[in-house]
Amino acid sequence: MKTSRRSFILFSISAASSLALTRGASADAAQVSETDPKAQALGYKQVASTVDKTKFSNYVAGQNCSNCSLFQGKSTDAWGGCMLFGDKQVAATGWCSSYSNM
Ligand code: SF4
Protein backbone atom coordinates (compact mmCIF):
# COMPACT_ATOMS: atom_id res chain seq x y z
CA MET A 1 0.00 0.00 0.00
CA LYS A 2 1.39 3.38 -0.95
CA THR A 3 1.92 5.91 1.81
CA SER A 4 -0.52 8.44 0.39
CA ARG A 5 -3.27 5.83 0.14
CA ARG A 6 -2.58 4.65 3.70
CA SER A 7 -2.61 8.25 4.91
CA PHE A 8 -5.92 8.86 3.16
CA ILE A 9 -7.49 5.77 4.75
CA LEU A 10 -6.19 6.70 8.23
CA PHE A 11 -7.43 10.26 7.78
CA SER A 12 -10.86 9.00 6.69
CA ILE A 13 -11.16 6.69 9.69
CA SER A 14 -10.06 9.48 12.02
CA ALA A 15 -12.51 11.96 10.49
CA ALA A 16 -15.39 9.48 10.68
CA SER A 17 -14.58 8.71 14.33
CA SER A 18 -14.46 12.40 15.20
CA LEU A 19 -17.79 13.01 13.48
CA ALA A 20 -19.38 10.07 15.32
CA LEU A 21 -18.07 11.36 18.66
CA THR A 22 -19.29 14.88 17.93
CA ARG A 23 -22.75 13.66 16.98
CA GLY A 24 -22.87 11.34 19.99
CA ALA A 25 -21.94 14.12 22.37
CA SER A 26 -24.55 16.40 20.85
CA ALA A 27 -27.26 13.75 21.03
CA ASP A 28 -26.44 13.09 24.67
CA ALA A 29 -26.48 16.75 25.71
CA ALA A 30 -29.08 17.59 28.31
CA GLN A 31 -32.06 19.58 27.13
CA VAL A 32 -33.37 22.62 28.95
CA SER A 33 -36.69 21.88 30.63
CA GLU A 34 -39.38 24.52 30.91
CA THR A 35 -39.46 23.73 34.65
CA ASP A 36 -35.77 24.55 35.07
CA PRO A 37 -35.63 27.59 37.44
CA LYS A 38 -33.50 29.61 35.01
CA ALA A 39 -35.82 28.70 32.12
CA GLN A 40 -38.82 29.82 34.16
CA ALA A 41 -37.13 33.10 35.07
CA LEU A 42 -36.48 33.78 31.38
CA GLY A 43 -39.92 32.61 30.27
CA TYR A 44 -38.37 29.86 28.13
CA LYS A 45 -40.85 27.77 26.19
CA GLN A 46 -39.96 24.83 23.99
CA VAL A 47 -42.45 26.03 21.40
CA ALA A 48 -42.28 29.78 20.89
CA SER A 49 -45.96 30.20 20.02
CA THR A 50 -46.89 29.04 23.55
CA VAL A 51 -45.10 31.99 25.21
CA ASP A 52 -47.25 33.83 27.74
CA LYS A 53 -47.68 37.02 25.72
CA THR A 54 -49.26 38.92 28.60
CA LYS A 55 -46.16 38.30 30.70
CA PHE A 56 -43.62 38.62 27.86
CA SER A 57 -44.95 41.34 25.58
CA ASN A 58 -41.58 41.58 23.79
CA TYR A 59 -42.30 38.27 22.05
CA VAL A 60 -42.96 38.73 18.32
CA ALA A 61 -44.34 35.92 16.16
CA GLY A 62 -41.55 34.35 14.08
CA GLN A 63 -38.93 34.74 16.79
CA ASN A 64 -37.46 31.45 17.99
CA CYS A 65 -34.18 30.01 19.19
CA SER A 66 -33.05 28.98 15.71
CA ASN A 67 -32.96 32.63 14.58
CA CYS A 68 -31.68 34.06 17.87
CA SER A 69 -28.10 35.32 17.86
CA LEU A 70 -27.40 33.41 21.11
CA PHE A 71 -28.30 30.03 19.54
CA GLN A 72 -25.19 27.95 18.95
CA GLY A 73 -26.68 25.22 16.78
CA LYS A 74 -27.09 25.31 13.02
CA SER A 75 -30.32 26.75 11.64
CA THR A 76 -31.33 23.21 10.65
CA ASP A 77 -30.68 21.63 14.09
CA ALA A 78 -33.71 20.65 16.18
CA TRP A 79 -31.74 21.37 19.36
CA GLY A 80 -28.64 23.45 19.99
CA GLY A 81 -26.64 25.22 22.61
CA CYS A 82 -27.53 28.63 23.96
CA MET A 83 -25.05 31.03 25.52
CA LEU A 84 -27.40 31.41 28.50
CA PHE A 85 -27.82 27.75 29.37
CA GLY A 86 -24.26 26.42 29.52
CA ASP A 87 -23.96 22.88 28.21
CA LYS A 88 -27.71 22.27 28.02
CA GLN A 89 -29.51 22.55 24.71
CA VAL A 90 -32.60 24.54 23.81
CA ALA A 91 -35.19 23.63 21.20
CA ALA A 92 -34.80 25.39 17.86
CA THR A 93 -38.53 26.09 18.10
CA GLY A 94 -38.14 27.61 21.56
CA TRP A 95 -37.99 31.16 22.84
CA CYS A 96 -37.06 33.10 25.96
CA SER A 97 -37.22 36.74 26.99
CA SER A 98 -33.51 37.22 26.22
CA TYR A 99 -34.14 36.64 22.53
CA SER A 100 -31.83 38.73 20.36
CA ASN A 101 -31.35 38.93 16.63
CA MET A 102 -28.44 41.39 16.56
S1 SF4 B 1 -31.42 33.38 24.36
FE1 SF4 B 1 -32.15 32.89 22.30
S2 SF4 B 1 -31.42 30.81 21.89
FE2 SF4 B 1 -31.29 31.14 24.10
S3 SF4 B 1 -33.22 30.33 24.90
FE3 SF4 B 1 -33.48 32.53 24.59
S4 SF4 B 1 -34.36 32.72 22.51
FE4 SF4 B 1 -33.51 30.65 22.70
Image: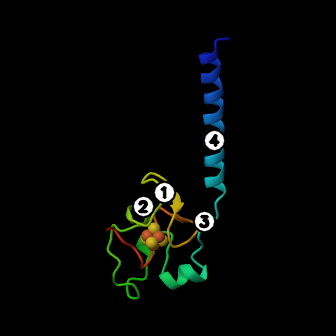
* Residue assigned mark 3: 87
Name the amino acid, label 3. Answer: Asp
Distance between mark 2 and mark 4 Cα atoms = 25 Å
Name the amino acid, label 4. Answer: Ser
Q: For the residues carrying marks 2 and 4, which lies nearer the camera in this image?
A: 4
* Residue assigned mark 4: 18
- The residue drawn where x is 49% and y is 76% is 44
Quadrant of picture, ligand 1: bottom left
Q: At which x and y percent is residue 27?
A: 63, 54
Tell me the SS state at disc 1: loop
* Residue assigned mark 1: 73
Residue 29 or residue 50, whichever sits in front: 29
- The residue drawn where x is 44% and y is 51% is 76
Q: Earlier in the sequence, mark 2 or mark 4?
A: 4
Do residues under tags 3 and 2 come within 8 Å of each other at their CB atoms?
no
Distance between mark 3 and mark 2 Cα atoms = 17 Å
Q: Work out which residue is located at the far top of the displayed protein and give it.
A: 1
Q: For the residues carrying marks 1 and 2, which lies nearer the camera in this image?
A: 1
Disc 1 within 8 angstroms of ligand 1 (CB): no
Identify the disc placed on residue 30: none
Name the amino acid, label 1. Answer: Gly
Q: At which x and y percent is residue 43?
A: 48, 81
The picture quadrant where one finds residue 69 is bottom left
21 shown above or below 99: above
Q: Quadrant of the N terminus?
A: top right
* Residue assigned mark 2: 66
Q: Work out which residue is located at the far bottom of the displayed protein and give it.
A: 55
Tell me the SS state at disc 2: helix
Name the amino acid, label 2. Answer: Ser
Disc 3 within 8 angstroms of ligand 1 (CB): no
